[in-house]
Image (tube, coloured by chain):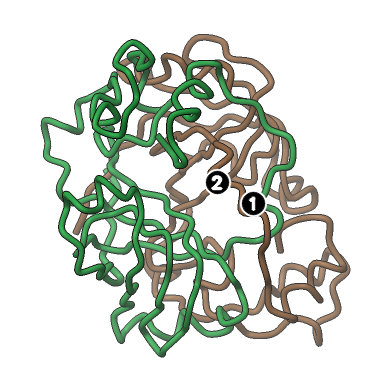
Chain colours: A green, B brown
Amino acid sequence: MFELIPIGLVHTNIKDEELHQKGSVDGIIEIFPEFKEGLDALNGFSHLILVTYLDRVGVEDRRTLKIRFRHLQRAGVPLNVLPEVGVFASDSPHRPNPIGISIVEVQKFDEGFIHVRGLDVYDGTPVIDIKPYTPFRKVQNINVPEWFSKISSYLNREP
Amino acid sequence: MFELIPIGLVHTNIKDEELHQKGSVDGIIEIFPEFKEGLDALNGFSHLILVTYLDRVGVEDRRTLKIRFRHLQRAGVPLNVLPEVGVFASDSPHRPNPIGISIVEVQKFDEGFIHVRGLDVYDGTPVIDIKPYTPFRKVQNINVPEWFSKISSYLNREP
């Protein structure tokens, strides 16, 4: 068992339902004062990797190993396009360790507060780490399975 | 405090010193049998986001907030090019929550064992999550600070 501590919080002031519809929103990453020094020299990176602990995921949901993206029906994806897949082949919050990885675009650094675009987590989600998004994180040639391409063709975002 | 559980292990059979020199190596991600179902439909993704718990990082190291990339001197980067930066502006394992994020290239799926390229963690490191690397993870236009570009010009990899 490994123990993590919150180093900050995500603030979006956006209701859950609105986030579900939009997929991602603007907001502020607050880093608690005792960890602020760790942000030194981060200024200049246009994008960050935000690691969060998805604290709304309960003990039962952490036992989930297969999902079906049912929520995407609301976004217009037909049910027959939505296969059942393993949680590790998805971005589902329901997984053994509910860790969120968001790639966000920095709008402004303001001391311990980072204004960003592209937050796909609920208002109030605890932050556990921040890493710079560097050219080494960008893979040029990638492949995805056909089921993933099919779903993506109905959306403009991560399924 | 948030609790994570190991879902697998990284196997590289590579000594620490060799990893330091090379930066990344080939190896196998083992997912424990009780979590194997979560890998369904992962086949077809060429790259994965591997989330690890860097278990060699001790309690004291988790208090680190500033680092200086001193180890890069061995890789030929002059000391005067190495600024002191906050841990969140770096990929240092010394940080409040020692979470590793590696983007690895799949060579072969073999049941609960995934053969990959690009492992930058020690042999035996616990795995806590796997997510597919999708086109949405690839940011087209990014900026990095000058200090980062300068260091990168001496290396072919993540500082």
Which residue does the image show at 78% across and 73% down from the upper left?
A: B149
Dot 1 and dot 2 residues touching (CB under 8 Å):
yes
Please say if B39 is above or below A20.
above
The image's mark for residue A137 is 1
| Pointer 2 residue | B137
Which amino acid, mark 2? Arg
Instruction: Please check whether the numbered discs 1 and 2 fall on a single chain.
Output: no
Which residue does the image show at 40% across and 37% down from the upper left?
A: B129
Which residue does the image show at 46% across and 76% down from the upper left?
A: B64
B144 vs B58, nearest the viewer: B144
Which residue does the image show at 64% across and 39% down from the upper left?
A: B119
Helix or strand or loop: what does disc 1 sit on? helix
In the image: residue A141, left or right of residue B134: right
**Quadrant housing the N terminus of chain A:** top left
Q: Position of residue A15 (x, y in %)?
A: 15, 58
Please say if B152 is above or below B113.
below
Please say if A16 is above or below B30.
below
Extreme-front residue of the structure: A76
**Quadrant housing the C terminus of chain A:** top left
- The answer for which chain carries disc 2 is B
Between the residue at mark 1 and the residue at mark 2, the CA separation in whole angstroms equals 9 Å
Number of marks: 2
Helix or strand or loop: what does disc 2 sit on? helix
